[in-house]
Image (cartoon, rainbow, N blue to C red):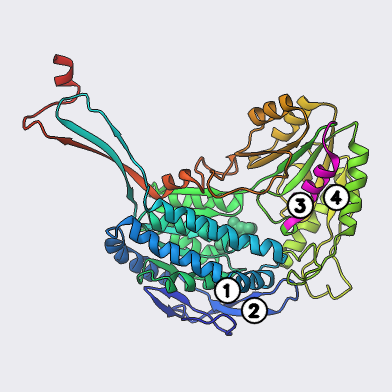
């Protein structure tokens, strides 16, 4: 078993910890300091072939393990996560950078999802229906599909793998997992705990490495019929194209340009708390982050003033320090991307109210820190109000009434999360009906999904599939309809029925 804290880590294939076939490695860095946290195999398509072969072989016996028994392993895994929650939280604040309260939430989400999906081991319900013919029985059952390719991002490094791997396993599939190259150590720990829970060799395999080398090889592999991917829209399109020739099931969870609407009757204390949490939590690196705030013009000045003051009070620092409000962003490239959008916003004529630069001094110089950034007087069609920035930047957009607020909220290509702060129940219900997103919150920010409801979005946020809840099972199973005729004679559906 690999040991967290050691210098060099391995892939996990067929129950063995192994180096990449080419022997190359890459480093994972601590975003708060820029220092390496470990060295990982830079795998090749050859490693993917091995992992898929192991998963394919393991599938033949894993699919026959009764689902409640598969679930028992997940229950044990959840118990390991509970036992190791503090170490995983601390490790996440180092390797990924988010503050401890959020890192603990990330681990908790994985515990909740694993328990929920373990419960499916005794459900996985199908349907029975009456037959149109006498002495005939019929039902539908969920069947496992085979080897699932799991490709994850770095922003929820324990939660997102659990959202994909727990349902895939309880449904009877095996897994080849390629974690994000920025958080491989957390993935390593995740899989160690799964192995310790008693998962048979080959049921879950990890192949570390880069998207274009390892991720793409998984997506194109003929023995991987299902791909579940969370990441950027651009990569999601590439994945879809690469999988198209083989008509694979591709589940996509992509970007967002989520809006919070604040009406003139809103409880402003609550709204400001919700905006700060949704815009700057995880340093804005959540697909559900509130990167737009649509504010009724009557209260616009007040909201702007309160938000700027809240952003300027935020203390930047390493995620593991208790007093930190805002941790670093993931890497140097992220700083450059976020800063380029600050330039774009200024050029477009938006008013930079606060932030707008990398943070330095006070021990922050070696880390990847960006000041919480708010643009005011943003027009809905500006690029900073249309494109996903994935950093601590939000855009305030004034509107004159509710209808304009809904129109502006919907006028983006993404459709993940939305929220409205209002005391008016009629408006709240209209917003629930009219906001074109997969998730809508009333009097709460744009984040806070729970594991037993579907998670995912409309428009370019995905391709119609959902994670979490019962909906997730549709990605990881195929429906099979079964007809059992006990009449002892040939009965022909539709034909015999029509003649009678
Ligand atoms: P982000 O910009 O948030 O890192 P990406 O979409 O680039 O998002 O990455 C999400 C995951 O997809 C990562 O694990 C990454 O390695 C992987 N990935 C990147 N490019 C590809 C690709 N062409 N095919 C498959 N996976 C990829």
In the rendered view of the protein, which quadrant contains the C terminus? top left
Q: Earlier in the sequence, mark 3 or mark 4?
A: 3
Range of residues picked out in magenta: 265-281
Determine whether label 3 and label 4 are within 8 Å by CB: no
Give me the C-alpha separation between circle 2 and circle 3: 28 Å
Q: Position of residue 325 (x, y in %)?
A: 80, 62
What residue is shown with label 2? Answer: 37
Label 3, secondary structure: give it. helix
Q: Earlier in the sequence, mark 2 or mark 1?
A: 2
Residue at left 43%, top 72%? 195
Label 2, secondary structure: give it. strand
Q: Which mark is residue 277?
A: 3
What residue is shown with label 4? Answer: 374
Q: Earlier in the sequence, mark 2 or mark 3?
A: 2
Determine whether label 1 and label 3 are within 8 Å by CB: no
Residue 312 magenta-drawn?
no
């Amino acid at each position: 078993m690999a040991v967290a804290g050691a210098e060099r880590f391995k892939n996990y294939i067929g129950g063995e910890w192994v180096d990449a076939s080419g022997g190359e490695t890459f480093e994972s860095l601590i975003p708060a300091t820029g220092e390496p946290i470990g060295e990982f195999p830079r795998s090749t398509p050859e490693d993917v072939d091995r992992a898929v072969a192991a998963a394919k072989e393991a599938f033949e016996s894993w699919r026959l393990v009764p689902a409640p028994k598969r679930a028992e392993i997940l229950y044990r895994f959840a118990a390991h996560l509970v036992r190791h929650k503090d170490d995983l939280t601390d490790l996440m604040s180092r390797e990924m950078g988010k503050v401890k309260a959020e890192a603990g939430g990330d681990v908790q989400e994985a515990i909740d999802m694993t328990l929920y999906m373990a419960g499916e081991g005794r459900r996985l319900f199908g349907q029975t229906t009456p037959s149109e013919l006498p002495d005939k029985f019929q039902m539908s059952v969920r069947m496992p599909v085979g080897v699932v390719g799991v490709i994850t991002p770095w922003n929820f490094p324990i939660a997102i793998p659990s959202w994909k791997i727990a349902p895939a396993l309880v449904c009877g599939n095996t897994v080849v997992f390629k974690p994000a190259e920025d958080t491989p150590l957390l993935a390593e720990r995740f899989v160690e705990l799964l192995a310790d829970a008693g998962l048979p060799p080959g049921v879950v395999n990890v192949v570390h490495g880069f998207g274009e080398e390892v991720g793409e090889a998984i997506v194109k592999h003929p023995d991987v019929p299902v791909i579940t991917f969370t990441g950027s829209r651009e990569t999601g399109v590439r994945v879809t194209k690469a999988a198209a020739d083989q008509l694979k099931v591709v589940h996509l969870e992509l970007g967002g340009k989520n809006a919070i609407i604040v009406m003139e009757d809103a409880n402003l204390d609550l709204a400001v708390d919700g905006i700060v949490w949704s815009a700057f939590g995880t340093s804005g690196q959540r697909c559900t982050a509130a990167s737009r705030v649509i504010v009724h013009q009557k209260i616009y000045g007040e909201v702007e003033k309160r938000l700027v003051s809240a952003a300027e009070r935020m203390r930047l620092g390493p995620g593991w320090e208790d007093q930190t409000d805002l941790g670093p962003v993931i890497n140097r490239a992220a700083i450059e991307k976020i800063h380029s959008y600050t330039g774009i916003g200024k050029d477009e004529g938006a008013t930079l109210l606060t932030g707008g630069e990398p943070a330095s001094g006070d021990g922050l110089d070696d880390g990847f820190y960006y000041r919480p950034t708010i643009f005011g007087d943003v027009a809905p069609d500006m690029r900073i109000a249309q494109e996903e920035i994935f950093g601590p930047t939000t855009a305030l957009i004034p509107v004159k009434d509710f209808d304009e607020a809904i129109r502006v909220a919907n006028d983006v290509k993404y459709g993940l999360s939305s929220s409205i702060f209002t005391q008016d129940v009629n408006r709240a219900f209209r917003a629930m009906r009219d906001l074109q997103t997969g998730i809508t919150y009333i009097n709460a920010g744009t984040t806070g999904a729970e594991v037993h409801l579907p998670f995912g979005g409309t428009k370019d946020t995905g391709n119609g599939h959902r994670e979490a809840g019962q909906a997730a099972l549709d990605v990881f199973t195929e429906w099979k309809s079964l007809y059992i005729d006990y009449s002892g004679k040939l009965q022909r559906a539709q034909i015999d029925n029509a003649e009678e």
